[in-house]
Amino acid sequence: MWGVMLIAAMVFGVVGPSSVDGSRPIPKVKVKSGLDVLLEHPEQLKGKKVGLITNPTGITRDYRHGLDAMLAEGIDVVKVYGPEHGVRGTEQAGEIPGTYEDPRTGLPFINLYGKKPAEMVPLFDGVDVLVFDIQDVGTRYYTYIYTMAYAMEAAAQVKKPFVVLDRPNPIGGTQVEGPVLQPEYSSFVGLYPIPQRHGMTVGELARLFNEEFLSQKADLRVIPMNGWTREKSYEDTGLPWVLPSPNMPTVDTAVVYPGTGMIEGTNLSEGRGTTRPFELLGAPYIKGWELAEALNKKGLPGVSFREAYFTPTFSKYQGKPVGGVQVYVEDRESFQPVLTGMTIVQEVKKLYPEEFAWRKDGSTYWIDKLTGSDRIRKKIDEGVPAPEIEAGWQEELKEFQQLRQQYLIYPPKNL
């Protein structure tokens, strides 16, 4: 048994005239991902049949997909598994990816999205070890971390080691924000009691999940990054950005997502079907100038708003002109996405009380799933100001910060 362990790594940059195959320059990189660290010591997986859980974000510093890089290093990958959106990232949100044979490698590409641990167990037949390499975006309701958790549980049941190749939290690892999920609201957009903005990497989350929440502990190994510190922005890492899902095109999207992702729980468009999802927000009943003026008067830290108009090509209000705002984050350090998201919803509800509505899935309010309880919805309906709502979860946030401390791998730069 490997047990829960970390691989010690030296911190150094990478400078080189060409990639390992001589085909392209290797960028000057300040941070190495867990994948790049693994590829420097591929013997760790030699002689094992590997099941790789990945998507388009699982790339090396010189833009090769991890699957190709592992095969080139003689690592015997025998099966490849994909989360929501699929191994190749081709499916939209909520669509079930297919299972098929990859035309390039001939390997089976197997869908894990929508499957519980018991359904994953037979899919792991024929592999000796599971390796997870997917870029997360730092928000509780992004589903990749729960595919990881379910796969860890399945791996534990069949006694197969589970390796996490760590990657940066693109919105940083210092700030923790938002309500902690209440267990009775557990779903695939929030399985465990963690806050909306958790401030952890996937490797750190894997350690937390394994020790605190999984019914059966996995034989977990985390391969850390080299050179990452908690306050680094993604742009500071020097690592290439690959959109983690079809509606997460930029780091800017990830920055606003812990807050504006809540817009999905309303009848506002969250900007799906535009080139700036989660930054463009609106509805046909909104007058952009009214909403922009109201929001700018709030003086929210680190953010401003521009009146905006757009016509979504799919999703809510497909083909219909929409009025609203575009969100401009001017200072990421002071920006508070959850406070901002609540304020946007409040101002829309105040300006357009007859037209605004919460999105329902049968008898379930979608906003309750996203926020991990019914309190934000109820407090907004009661007219409680957003800062007062935010004050209501500070004690539980402190408790979570104390809990997470023992599972952090990377110290702040000044320690």
Image (cartoon, rainbow, N blue to C red):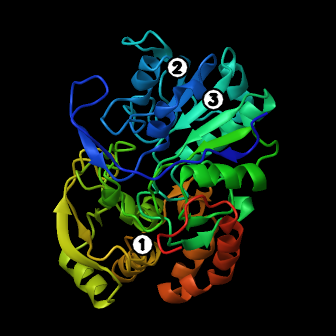
Helix, strand or loop at label 2? It is loop
Count of number-bearing discs: 3
Q: Which amino acid does label 1 sit on?
A: Pro
Residue at the spot of label 3? 130
Mark-to-mark CA distance, 1 and 2: 41 Å
> On the image, which quarter does residue 329 sit in?
bottom left
Of residues 366 and 28, the one nearer the viewer is 28
Does 342 sit above or below residue 242?
Answer: below
Residue at the spot of label 1? 337
Mark-to-mark CA distance, 1 and 3: 34 Å
Of residues 332 and 181, the one nearer the viewer is 332
Instruction: Give the side of residue 276 with respect to residue 355, left or right.
Output: left
**Residue at x 24% of width, y 24% of height:** 22
Q: Residues within 10 Å of mark 3 (few under 14, many from 20)?
A: many
**Residue at x 35% of width, y 55% of height:** 237
Residue at the spot of label 2? 75
Q: Could you say where residue 98 lies in the image, as x and y percent from the top left?
A: 48, 22
Q: Residues within 10 Å of mark 2 (few under 14, many from 20)?
A: many
Instruction: Give the side of residue 369 with respect to residue 103, left or right.
Output: right
Q: Which of marks 1 and 3 is nearer the N terminus?
A: 3
